[in-house]
Amino acid sequence: MLIKKFDPLKKKMLQIIDVYGNIVDESLVPKIDDETLLKMYKTMLLGRIADTKAVQFQRQGRMLTFVVNKGQEASQVGTAAALEKKDWLVPAFREFSALLYRGAPLEQLYLYWYGNELGSKYAEDVKILPINVPIGSQFNHANGIGMASNILNKNEVVLTYIGDGGTSHGEFHEGLNFAAVFNTPVVFIIQNNHYAISVPRNKQTKSETLAQKAIAYGMPGIQVDGNDILAVYAATKEAVDRARNGEGPTLIELVTYRLGPHTTSDDPTIYRENKEVEEWEKKEPLIRFKKYLVDIGLWSEEQEGKEIEEITNYVNETFKKVENSGLVPLEDIFKYQYAEMPPHLVEQYEEYKQYLEEVNE
Amino acid sequence: MATISLIQAVNQALEQQMEKDPTVVVFGEDVGFEGGVFRATAGLQKKFGEMRCFDTPIAEAGIIGAALGMAINGLKPVAEIQFSGFMLPGYNQIVAHIARMRNRSRGRYTAPLVIRMPYGGGIRALEHHSESQETLFAHIPGLKVVIPSTPYDAKGLLTAAIQDPDPVIFMEPKRIYRAFKQEVPDEEYIVPIGKAKIVNNGTDITVVAWGAMVREVQKAMKTLEGEGISVELIDLRTISPIDQETIVESVKKTGRFLVVHEAVRAFGPGAELIAMINKHAFLSLEAPPTRLTGFDIIVPLDKGEHHYIIDPKRIAYEVKKLIQY
């Protein structure tokens, strides 16, 4: 049991591949089939490239404000990969690669950040809630989904996310307390990327680790190297199994780093040193995982080059489609407010249409 | 006199009041070291230290609830909520405590505090970043709700808000934070809360607006002037309490009334103003007092937002309809 072995109160952090890509402890390496390992790595690459491209498009004035994910791909993919098809993912707003892994199409993710609500309308079999902007509130939604799973005997597990800043929020507390009280099958992930916009992690809480907060709620907590995808997967898988077996919720702190700005509107040079960023560049998650895959004979430089080229083309084509997707039809901004449009809204809609006709728009 | 933007005027008012009154403290998310995501509090921590301008953890109920405690115990807190859409976790503190403290303690405790927040749409923003929620505050007894539309008013109204004996919700139209500059006196001055401003004297119709909508009405007026329509434009400036006198007098003169607001329509300030006009200027009316507002929908994301945000063309269209009524 990793969760027992790595006690956050004893300052133990789970790591399986070190920053150089070497295995720290062979006995801890999780069993993942080759196909899944490759899917994980390719999704990380897609996440990285699509994220970097989105920032470029934004700088060119072609994309709106975009939440930047660079550096957090292992935390996102490693957690998402531990779920089964029937499970739920309840995101905050910095889970780009997790959403990709769970079947949210890139086109939709781009569409969302491009300012179109259809970006939140996933296919019926994609069990992801829309991106959640108000801090912390998703924890309680995750519990509700988990409670429904318990009450209706669905045996589904829920994976939800928050940032280090989010742990200050009342809903973080309420969510964890509910989870423990109702023994919900929820895995709570904290992506500790060290900054809540400009406010550093050490100003957010006096707790030495974020994982240790679990103890007070009566649930296990574990701190994990969030840039080590094998460790992220192993801890999450264990927590998912616990949840599936009716053993209740787990809190996992993933220690990672936001290599980019908070969003494209943010200028991180105001509040952090370049030197610090450079240090974390060395610990970033893709290099490490790639070396592991090359070492076990699953990946090569040649494959890497080909994959990057394919992804880059795919990303460019996808964004072109999004750019050409046009405006939201007028009807759509009215018709989804209620199951049936109430009379006052019908009136507003009709009057506006008449106005548009009269002014020939 | 310096020529400054609305956001700079906010910064100047904060700095001046902090300088003048050592009990004024400024805080919120990213407010201290960084100086605010919009730079409203830039330089304040450096100048006044971390005890008077500081970052808080992300917790709006914490920020707003603590502001009340500070106000009770001798400080003049000016709390910032990063975007008005994120105010809601703190709404319980505002409604259940801040607004009620004077009344329930029969004046023993009061809440002389300011809660600042950028609000409004038209900036191609993410979800929860475009709402106009003034109705949520104006509906609550015990609160004052202020919205400036110019740098001059922003400084004078914020100064008044900080010096006010009661809680003031200070909503800043972020769309025009940097849209234009204006000459603003360097020294302290007050723009009184509860007093609307006649921006333009006119004879045919009274148009009331606030925040970013004031400029849109001004743009519409250029078209309307060309067609011989004379608009009396009133910037409401304080949403609650409403300056009844200025508006009623104006409507008695012009006989027509249009309110333009970005907030959704239902149960909003437009309805409040029209009820007031019906009571006090009914016999002067030559057309039904009318509201041009946001639709009763969630503010659409960028690719649908243009339908929601009221533009000068629609304002001119509504005005002409009332003139021709």
Image (cartoon, rainbow, N blue to C red):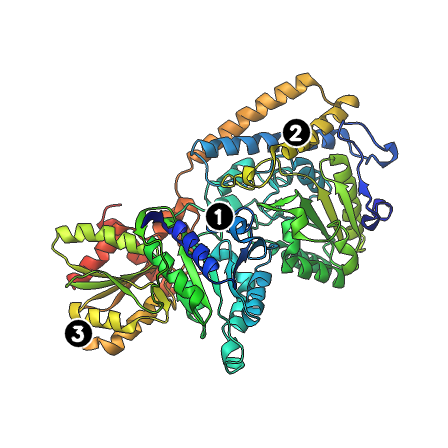
Residue A330: image tag: none
> Image quadrant of residue B296?
bottom left
- Eyeballing the image, is B83 above or below A194? below
> The residue tagged with tag 1: helix, strand or loop?
loop
Which amino acid type corresponds to the residue marked 1 in the rendered image?
Answer: Ala
Q: Amino acid at mark 3?
A: Ser
Looking at the image, residue B285 sits to the left or right of residue A223; the answer is left
Residue B82 x, y percent position in the rendering: 51, 53
Q: Which residue is mark 2?
A: A42
B185 relative to A306 in the view: left or right: left
Examine the image and state in which quarter residue B295 appears: bottom left
Residue A141 or A208: which is nearer the viewer?
A: A208
Residue A146 screen position, x and y as percent: 70, 56
Pick the front one: A295 or A144: A295
* Residue under label 3: B284
Q: Determine which residue is flagged by label 1.
A: B42
Q: Residues within 10 Å of mark 1 (few under 14, many from 20)?
A: many
Please report, as a chain letter, where disc 3 is located. B
The kind of residue tagged 2 is Lys
Report x, y in % for residue B256. 19, 67
- For disc 1, the chain is B
Cα separation between marks 2 and 1:
43 Å
Marks 3/2: CA distance?
A: 72 Å
Q: Is residue B136 visible?
A: no
